[in-house]
Image (cartoon, rainbow, N blue to C red):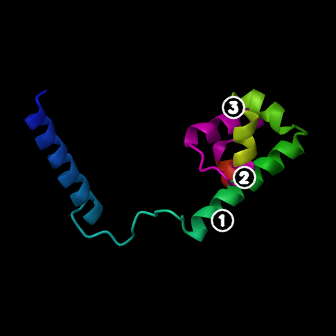
Amino acid sequence: MNAQRWRLDTYRAVEVAASLRQTNDHGHPERYQVPTDPLPDWVLQQRRRVGDRIRDLREERELSQEQLAELAGLSRHTIYRIELAQYGTSIDHLALIARALRVEIAALFS
């Protein structure tokens, strides 16, 4: 790809991204802004609730963070950070943790 073509494609990608931020799927202006740093308190509260629930389930099963990490295929440090809400985790990690705890993923949110 030549440099001029690359610049044109990049310019178009930036234009598309800008238009997506301004409208929703129906072409209407967005009511809510995408959170930026720092994250809103309500997001951090939800993260804490999930971390607390994981810790509670782990302790009910008398598992250490290290044991849960091994069962889930994650590092102990990752489990630690999720439980303390220091880490915005992925749905993939939550699915692995739920399976290791033998619960449905929805149980991590209740």
Q: Are marks 1 and 2 in contact (CB under 8 Å)?
A: no
Q: Are marks 3 and 1 in contact (CB under 8 Å)?
A: no
Spatial separation of the CA atoms under disc 1 and disc 2: 10 Å
* Outermost residue to the left: 4
Of labels 1 and 2, earlier in sequence is: 1
Please tell me which residue lies in front, 26 or 70. Answer: 70
Q: Which mark is residue 74?
A: 3
Q: Which residue is mark 2?
A: 51
**Residue 97 picture quarter:** top right
Tell me the element at label 2: helix
- Give the side of residue 91 with respect to residue 51, left or right: left
Whether residue 102 is visible here, answered yes or no, is no
Residue 69, position in %: x, y?
75, 33
- Give the side of residue 44 with respect to residue 81, left or right: left
Report the quarter where the C terminus lies. bottom right
Identify the residue at horizontal 11%, vertical 42% (top origin). Answer: 8
For disc 2, the neighbor class at 10 Å (few under 14, some 14 to 19, many from 20) is many
